[in-house]
Amino acid sequence: MTTSQPYALLITGGCGFIGSNFVRYWLDRHPTSRIVVYDKLTYAGRRENLLDLWSHSNLSLVVGDISDQAMVRQTCLAHGIDMIVNFAAETHVDVSILGPLVFTDTNVRGTHVLLEVARELGMRLHHISTDEVYGHIPDGHQSVETDSLAPRSPYAASKAAADQLVQAYAITYGLPVTITRGANNVGPYQYPEKAVPLFSTNALLGEPIPVYGDGLQMRDYAHVFDHCTGIETVLLHGQMGEVYNVGTGREMTNLEMVDIVLDTLGADHMLVRHVADRPGHDRRYSMNVDKLCGLGWAPQFDPKHAVAEAVKWYEDNRWWWEPIRRGVFREYYDRQYADRLAGREEQ
Ligand code: NAD
Ligand code: DAU
């Protein structure tokens, strides 16, 4: 699915996990495209995620906040941008429980600012959303794109609000927009606050694996590569104003995921600790992905394969995560896990 169409893309959040994987993927498949990464470089935004690509003549970085309307506008004009792809967000549910307001600032107001700039300059906007906007999904159902949104955490609520603003701009102003709602992604360069890189790096360090509650919550662990091809499919073939789910359509429990992590590393299963649950923990996400498959897309990784591949990347790339784990991450880790692991929080 290569195209010679020379898009000039503003990739917001392009130094984060999925954004950097997408930049890498897109430049490989569309080498004549120009990409401007626009990123605030929060703790999750890391220049080293694109270390080998910064010398690429079609890639540049602007350090800025998506809530800064003047700067977004000036960047789009200066670089002749014709499409914004919005990955920028605060993304961790546990962080949103500890300190929710920044989630509204970036995920809601920031997305709103991007919509305003797109409207003023006549640009298309593609927005990266999440399966969490559908809320907890009962057994036997898979979310389809027309389901109503029922978010249950501050993070999910901020993403749902952004989704609805994007759809409102399509309806009210006829702005050319598309939305993808992704399942739990795994793969290279995922900040180790998220379960798969946290459990992998803890196992590699010989530290306990903190499983929330009974560990029977269900997630669709999709490989970030499949998310990138799904976004590409929508950028090239999606219908304006439409929403597309991106996942594998298959879930596993967190305990099954933990088994894959530990078995891939040959680590001891005695490292597993059941700790106090996440408040409001969604029990199950599950999406129907037929609409995107109808555009000719199909995932290449099943969830087991995706998790195992991701774990191997952390095993082989200590250069990337060891400095993170030694830095400010430690402070967050202690706040989130010290009481849980010491059994001082109720299970
Ligand atoms: P991430 O936390 O790894 O990266 C987020 C990036 O956004 C970082 O580079 C950060 O510096 C940047 N950023 C944050 N606030 C900003 C601001 N105000 N202005 C500019 N840049 C800012 O996130 P991720 O996991 O790569 O997620 C990317 C997108 O995909 C998010 O919108 C997220 O909601 C969505 N999503 C993630 C998953 C997942 O499993 N990780 C699944 C579905 C959807
Ligand atoms: O579903 C898409 C979403 O996936 C994205 O929108 C979010 O940005 C992303 O963070 C992710 O959210 P989750 O909350 O599902 O992912 P997380 O990796 O935090 O947790 C995965 C599961 O593992 C979840 O059921 C909670 C559990 N968990 C997580 C952590 C960090 C634990 O049991 N222990 C932990 O320490």
Image (cartoon, helix red, strand yellow):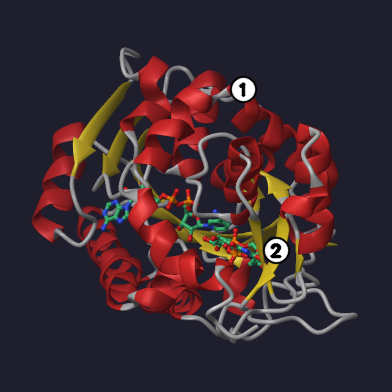
Please name the residue that numbered disc 1 is placed on: 316
State the SS at label 2.
Answer: strand
Q: Amino acid at mark 2?
A: Arg
Q: Is mark 1 within 8 Å of ligand 1?
A: no
Residue 300 seen in this snapshot: no
Give the percent coordinates (x, y) of residue 290: 81, 60
Which element type, helix, strand or loop, lies under badge 1?
helix
52 relative position to 217: left or right: left
**CB atoms of marks 2 and 1 within 8 Å:** no
Relative to 249, is 347 on the left or the right? left
* Nearer-N-terminus badge (2/1): 2
* Identity of the residue drawn at 75% across and 75% down: 284
User: Residue 43: x and y, percent?
Assistant: 31, 48
* 320 in relation to 150, above or below: above
> In 3D space, how far apart are the residues under numbered discs 2 and 1 (Cα atoms)?
25 Å
Residue 285 visible from this viewpoint: yes
Q: Quadrant of the C terminus?
A: bottom right
Q: Nearer the viewer, mark 2 or mark 1?
A: 2
Q: Is residue 279 left or right of residue 249?
A: left
**Residue 105 position within the rendered picture, expressed as x and y whole percent measured from the top left:** 25, 71
Q: Is residue 27 left or right of residue 265?
A: left
> For residue 245, which quarter of the picture?
bottom right
Quarter for ligand 2? bottom right
Q: Where is residue 24 drawn, in percent x and y?
A: 49, 27
Q: 246 or 329: which is nearer to us?
A: 329
Where is the N terminus found, in terms of image quarters?
A: top right
The disc label shown at residue 273, or none: 2
Label 2 CB sits under 8 Å from any ligand 2 atom: no
The residue depicted at 72 percent of the width and 71 percent of the height is: 285
- Residue at x 61%, y 55% (from the top left corner): 195
Label 1 Cα crowd, 10 Å radius (few <14 / some 14-19 / many 20+): few
Report crowding for label 2: few under 14, some 14 to 19, many 20 or more residues within 10 A (C-alpha).
some
